[in-house]
Image: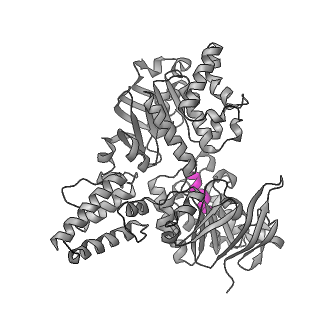
């Protein structure tokens, strides 16, 4: 089966000549949940923008669901990749929330009935139904961000890219986004998120790709990547709270989630009975 | 010192009050946090301290807000800006656009006050040194990283020698490196004796640095006190604030009998580590 995303030898230079991506190789299978981390300027968003064809490779190839982006229009790629921008104002344009959310599926040729169903489900998942008939610009930035997410979910694409989904969101909203990622995953959708939120990254993703200076510098499970201090330093990220706690306790095994931590604690508390001196 | 007395406020455009019956005393000096779900009234509270409410916003205003003895509603904005600085979310929006270098940008407010040139240079240099940005003095504010821009915004306020610095989610748009830069700058602000009032979703930051925490729920103060107490409150989830993962892990462990019953839930890494060490020892010894 062709992978969801296949990037080979990707180089991207901005028209001004600044090289933002410097040889990226990355293969993401269908159904994976991948978090891309790294400091601002590392190339994360530049790479993600290749996936829906907003930017095209200077060298190398980007293939999404079997389509080489170099020869594909953004309209064609939109059927494969839903992209939620970091700043919702970059993508919201309709006069009501509902119209904005319905635009995507209708534009992809879905029937009126199907469009209404997809929009309704996406608005329910993102909790924006209460203001479905409001103008998006009368909403708070955090609410607009949820509308932008709903508009992409409604397109029901096999790949969803989220650029900093938790930025500026409160606790409930972060929880909701965690649930949406889990639901997308359960439905077989490939989810790729760019994030600075390491706790979110650890709790919701199976694979972490760390970038620095236009390259991938680490790629593995959260436990593997968060156990590599040199790469984390390069990417300028701190491990999640739970990983720091485990390290503080001197646990050799990498624990990254609250669930994982409580399990390991229970094992150690039980296991300590047989230890010498106990 | 910031004092709210039975303060209620509704925006001119909205019907329901955003803040209701707020009684709040923020002691002089130190680092104080405000948390709450989106829509709880945090930014409104920040603007009421800085005076944009009521001076720039209008609306229905009842009760009293005072900063260092000056009643906000009775003090004109030009005087208030020398008492309260406000730093907002988006660093880029806070650059005046009227000046070419960081040094000039920081001096902008003092220029408008007509501060004498030598005095102005002295104050600008001192603030840049305090916040560790002397090296940026001759750069364009637009050529800086988000974190650096936000520290410049802090400097632009601090140079006015305010009694209070209010920050509304100053790190939410920054990467972790930028956020760290701002937190370090706030440490310097606090040491200079300025009262820091920080609105944020970054609970871990408050757990480590804040002296007191005020929890806003639907426009009312639901809880306040030292962060170790407020962050451990079981109602933080239902209030939509959440708790640090350390606290969450300990709460879960307590349910499984893996956290000493008489030990308070931790809010910081240090407290969590101490508690879990004890839990593993006790539990191991008991079996």
* x and y, in percent, of residue A29 in the image: 62, 79
Q: Quadrant of residue B252?
A: bottom left
* x and y, in percent, of residue B65 in the image: 41, 25
Residue A51 magenta-drawn?
A: no
Task: Establish if B198 lies above or below B105.
Answer: below
- Examine the residues drawn in magenta and state their main secondary structure: helix
Q: In this orientation, which residue lies closer to the viewer: B43 or A42?
A: A42
Scheme by which the image is coloured: one colour
Q: Quadrant of the C terminus of chain A?
A: bottom left
Task: Establish if B167 lies above or below B238.
Answer: above
Q: What's drawn in magenta, residue-wise?
A: A143-151
Task: Establish if A70 lies above or below B157.
Answer: below
Whether residue A261 is visible? yes
Q: Is residue B273 left or right of residue A171?
A: left
Instruction: Count the labels in the image.
Output: 0
Whether residue B90 is visible? no
* x and y, in percent, of residue B58 in the image: 53, 27
* x and y, in percent, of residue B103 in the image: 66, 28
Q: Is residue A91 left or right of residue A199?
A: right
Q: In this orientation, which residue lies closer to the viewer: A73 or B15?
A: A73
Q: Quadrant of residue A61?
A: bottom right
The residue drawn where x is 64% and y is 72% is A159
Q: Quadrant of the N terminus of chain A?
A: bottom right
Q: In this orientation, which residue lies closer to the viewer: A144 or B211?
A: B211
């Amino acid at each position: 089966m062709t992978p969801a995303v296949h990037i080979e030898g990707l180089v991207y230079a901005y028209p001004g000549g600044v090289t933002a991506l410097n040889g990226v190789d990355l293969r993401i299978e269908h159904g994976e949940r991948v978090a891309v981390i790294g400091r601002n300027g590392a190339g994360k968003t530049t790479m993600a923008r290749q996936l829906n064809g907003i930017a095209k490779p200077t060298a190398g190839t980007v293939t999404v669901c079997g389509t080489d982006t170099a020869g594909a229009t953004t309209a064609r790629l939109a059927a494969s990749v839903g992209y939620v921008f970091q700043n919702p104002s970059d993508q919201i344009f309709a006069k009501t929330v509902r119209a904005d959310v319905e635009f995507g599926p209708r534009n992809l040729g879905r029937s009126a009935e199907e469009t209404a169903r997809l929009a309704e489900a996406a608005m329910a998942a993102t909790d924006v139904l209460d203001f479905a008939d409001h103008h998006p610009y009368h909403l708070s930035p955090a609410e607009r961000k949820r509308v932008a997410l709903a508009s992409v979910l409604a397109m029901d694409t096999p790949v969803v890219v989220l650029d900093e989904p938790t930025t500026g969101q409160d606790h409930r909203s972060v929880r909701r986004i965690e649930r949406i990622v889990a639901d997308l995953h359960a439905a077989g959708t490939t989810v790729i998120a760019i994030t600075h939120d390491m706790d979110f990254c650890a709790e919701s993703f199976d694979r972490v790709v760390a970038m620095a200076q236009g390259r991938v510098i680490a790629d593995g499970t959260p436990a593997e990547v968060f156990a590599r201090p040199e790469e984390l330093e390069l990417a300028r990220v701190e491990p999640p709270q739970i990983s720091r706690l485990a390290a503080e306790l001197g646990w050799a095994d990498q624990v990254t989630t609250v669930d994982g931590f409580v399990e390991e604690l229970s094992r150690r508390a039980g296991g300590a009975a047989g230890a010498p001196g106990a | 010192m910031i004092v709210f007395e039975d303060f209620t406020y509704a925006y001119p455009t909205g019907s329901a009050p955003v803040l209701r019956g707020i009684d709040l005393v923020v002691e002089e000096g130190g680092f104080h946090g405000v948390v709450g779900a989106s829509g709880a009234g945090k930014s409104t509270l920040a603007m009421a301290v800085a005076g944009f409410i009521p001076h720039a916003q209008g609306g229905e205003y009842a009760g009293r807000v005072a900063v260092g003895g000056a009643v906000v509603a009775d003090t004109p904005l030009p005087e208030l800006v020398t008492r309260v600085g406000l730093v907002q979310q988006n660093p880029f929006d806070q650059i005046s656009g009227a000046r070419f270098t960081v040094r000039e940008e920081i001096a902008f407010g003092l220029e408008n006050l007509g501060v004498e040139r030598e005095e102005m240079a002295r104050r600008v240099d001192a603030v840049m040194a305090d916040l560790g940005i002397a090296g940026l003095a001759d750069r364009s504010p637009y050529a800086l990283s988000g974190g650096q821009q936000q520290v410049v915004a802090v400097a632009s306020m601090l140079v006015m020698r305010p009694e209070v610095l209010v920050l509304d989610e100053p790190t939410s748009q920054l990467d972790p490196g930028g956020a760290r830069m701002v937190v370090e700058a706030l440490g310097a602000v606090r040491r200079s004796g300025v009262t820091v009032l920080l609105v944020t979703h970054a609970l871990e930051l408050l757990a480590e640095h804040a002296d007191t925490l005020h929890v806003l729920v639907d426009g009312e103060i639901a809880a306040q006190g030292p962060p170790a107490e407020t962050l451990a409150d079981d109602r933080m989830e239902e209030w939509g604030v959440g708790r640090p993962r350390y606290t969450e892990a300990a709460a879960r462990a307590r349910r499984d009998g893996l956290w000493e019953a008489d030990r308070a839930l931790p809010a910081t890494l240090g407290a969590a580590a101490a508690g879990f060490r004890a839990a593993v020892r006790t539990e191991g010894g008991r079996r």
